[in-house]
Image (cartoon, rainbow, N blue to C red):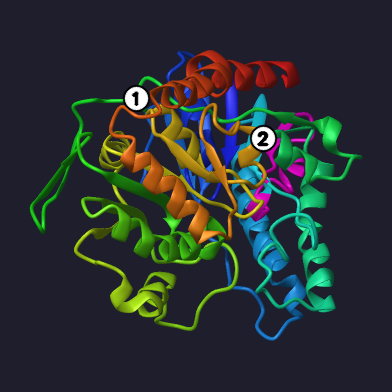
Amino acid sequence: MKILFAHQNFPGQYLHLARHLGAMPGNEVVFITQRNDAVLPGVKKIVYKPHRGITQKQHHYLSDTESSLLNAQAVVRIALGLKQSGFTPDVMLGHNGWGEIWYLKDVFPNTPLIGYFEFFYHFTGADVGFDPEEKLNFDVALSVRTKNLGNLLGLNTADLGQTPTEWQRSTYPALYQPKLNVIHEGIDTQIAVPDANARFTILDIGIDLTRDDEVVTYVARNLEPYRGFSVFMRSLPAILEKSPNAHVLIVGGDEVKYGQRLPDGQTHRLKMLAELGSSLDLSRVHFLGRLPYTTYLKVLQVSRVHVYLTFPFVLSWSMLESMAAGCLLVASKTAPVEEVICEGKNGFLVDFFSAEQIAHRVVDALMAGKDGYSDIRKNARRTIIEKYDLQTICLPAQLELLQRVV
């Protein structure tokens, strides 16, 4: 079978599927992307770049759309070259978020296309306006509606769609929901596992942490308000005061991927450190930046309690991986977290904006000891195995979807 993927951040959500297909004898797998540093065995990667940047001083509603349009043009040029060379895929898969799939059907009209759709933007009921401190005006509503131009074009182009959670599917217009199949890309529960003997060493200060220690963990791709970083930081003074032996491990970069960016040179990490000042014992708060996957898993495996917070937005892989690793989860009572977490059964839910609730739950978990709430930890892992396991649930569902369209 000939398979064509498109995703600007190779391999993105297609890591497991592309690896599986690339390993199958007889398959020819081509992946169009902007990323040139990663590789997968059996997958031929073709790197593209937009031929120019977006137009300056254009209408600000259209900047995201033009950026995606430039991506789509670059991808379609590669697709035309593939067709001229004799490569016609049996199936195409791509993430719609950056426009790359928009014109693929114009090159290969008889090849089925499965689009990956993460989120349909709304002025109310989701991320925009969730923070009561966010100042909105009517112009934002119009901008958000226009931002969905690419969503609508992709929905009209793809033969079928994939989305990772029921709530994310529900954000799309009812007209298109029958086209969207809820299939998570999957958690490898053979790698993300509890490890009673795990150790995590902070080399520069010589601290060696294990499951015997009172470790609080927080993970996000970037330390930003969308993932509750500000609220989490405000919970730390109380946590550290009431738990004098606790250490806090914070994983994530300083960029801003979601929401408004800060002025140049500023980060949310520095902003919160300035706000909290001397109330924060920095000898026990450790900013680790971004970590290799195996190192990141060690952080989860030594965790006594893991905090995951998010706006009503795209669900992070890290939350599901923390559950697979047997973490005791304190998570925000927001969609789509509530789709996974049942209060008191496989985790605890707190008010996203309440630093006091977060601190109370974390301190309670620390005081319970390393074996405290063991049933909840086991239930958390069981949830992932039964609903999100890569090998038994998610990969078979993705392959079935692929075979269906072929």
The percent coordinates of residue 390 (x first, y second) are: 50, 22
Q: Which mark is residue 242?
A: none
Residue 55, quarter of picture: bottom right
Residue 102 among those drawn in magenta: yes
Q: Residue at x 28, y 41 (%)?
A: 299
| The stretch drawn in magenta includes residue 309 | no
Q: Report the disc number at residue 165.
A: 2
In the displayed structure, would residue 364 be above or below residue 159?
below
Q: Can you say whether 390 is above or below 366 in the image?
A: above
Nearer to us in this view, 89 or 355:
355
Residue 193: numbered disc:
1
Secondary structure category for the residue under label 1: loop
Which badge, 1 or 2, is on the more N-terminal residue?
2
Give the amino acid at mark 2: Thr
Q: Secondary structure at mark 2?
A: loop
As shown in the figure, which amino acid type bears the numbered disc 1?
Val
Q: Categorize mark 1 by other alpha carbons within 10 Å: few (<14), some (14-19), many (20+).
A: many
Picture coordinates of residue 345, whole percent (x, y): 54, 26
Using the image as rendered, state which of residue 220 and residue 398 is in the foreground: 220
The Cα–Cα distance between marks 1 and 2, rounded to whole angstroms, is 22 Å
Q: Which residues are magenta?
A: 97-118
Cβ atoms under marks 1 and 2 closer than 8 Å: no
From what the image shows, is residue 349 above or below residue 238? Answer: above
Q: Residue at x 66, y 21 (%)?
A: 402
Residue 192 visible, this orientation: yes
Q: Quadrant of residue 209?
A: top left
